[in-house]
Image (cartoon, rainbow, N blue to C red):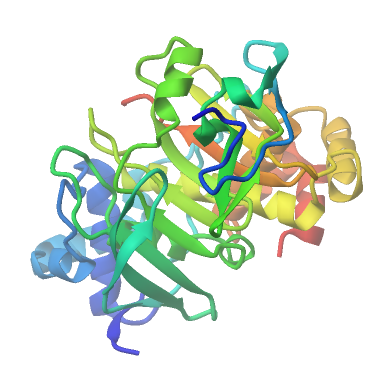
Amino acid sequence: MSGKRYNNQGDNDTAQQVAHVDHDHDHDHGHQHGSNASLVDEMQEMGPIEQVGSWLSNLFGGGQRDEAIDTNRQLVNERNRQPSVPYTISEGRVSRNFQFNGVRADAHVYTIVFEDGVELPIYAPAAPDENLHYHTVAEAALAASHLPLASRRRLTSIMLNPIENPQDEYWAAEYNRPDFHSYMTAGGAGQITIYPDDSRDVPGMETMKSSMVHETGHVWSYQAWGNDKTRGGWRDWAAAMTADGQSLSRYADSSIAEDVAETVQAYSSTQGTRRHDEYRRVVPNRFAVLDRDFR
Amino acid sequence: MGGNESPNGDIHPGTVVTKDDVRNLEKTEKAEDLPPFITWVDVNGVYKPVVRIEVTGDPDRLRITKFGEDGTMLESTVMSPPPQ
């Protein structure tokens, strides 16, 4: 397959470049705005000093310090410390009259091939709306490369929708929230849809990565444990919740499904670090269930 | 077109139950009174009827999860985080 290889492990040149994209988008929202520039184009614009600085920033966590785990916070919002799995992105091809969410339009289709064997198509609008802010194909690929394998292997596609979610207007009226705007949809069969925004820039790269971990956590839990939340893995989880006596966030308290997704985010984002052990001390029974099932 | 009919002409089972944990309410609505993009989900080109919706999260981070006839999770949508 033709395409470019992205590698955060061993290939210093591309590692720095990927690290740059990762870091850069966390801070200055350098997102696609009515265009569909590729990661290759973005990388070619970097200078060597930026690359080294970003690489060091990535290596040492951008100077951020870990705060003590506060189970009363709104969201886990844990920084994703998982390395990017090397991947290639194929040359784009055009799919005419592709069915996006709410509209048919020509799409550019790319295939990401991860070194762990997962292949994932990304669909992007061939003619993005100049008035909308979009995540890029490069950002979507990079976010997917940071997912734990247990989640990534459940995905079937990523779609950068050309238009905002057609449901937004309905939910905005229902909740009297004129600013209601869908960010991401996880389909039960493994499709991820990411929506553009008409009024403000899309969230930064770190938010995108953590959102994708959270959303795919939902996909994983329903696919692994089924839909009856009184049986199997769900029942084990409920017992673990009771045994732990506390959750990781107030958002987790809203439902058992959110509790799973929030815990998956903390579990998978910190694996191999001391932070993981800190979380395990807070919710040991939930982590034991994930040790058994999250694969 | 009401939500009782999919874009492909399929007929909805009839009602959608919404369990709203954010506002702590539960309601049952006729599919024909809702828009089709609420009552149907496109799953790989096949429209599946939505019979249950769960609203979770909090007012600043609502999550809408839709379920099909056999309890299958069809899709889960989260709203954008507030600007930082």
A61 vs A218, left or right, is: left
Can see residue A56? no
A251 is higher (above) or lower (below) than A26? above
Quadrant that contains the N terminus of chain A? bottom left
Name which quarter of the figure residue B2 lies in: top right
Which is more toward the observer, B6 or A135? B6
Question: At x 33% / y 69%, what residue is drawn?
Answer: A109
Which is more toward the observer, A51 or A273? A51
Question: At x 36% / y 15%, what residue is drawn?
Answer: A178
Quadrant that contains the C terminus of chain A? bottom right
Question: At x 53% / y 33%, what residue is drawn?
Answer: B36
Question: At x 28% / y 35%, what residue is drawn?
Answer: A197
A85 vs B63, left or right, is: left
**Residue A123 percent coordinates (x, y):** 36, 62
Which is more toward the observer, A273 or B34? B34
**Residue A33 percent coordinates (x, y):** 16, 46
Disc tally is: 0
**Residue B68 percent coordinates (x, y):** 71, 42
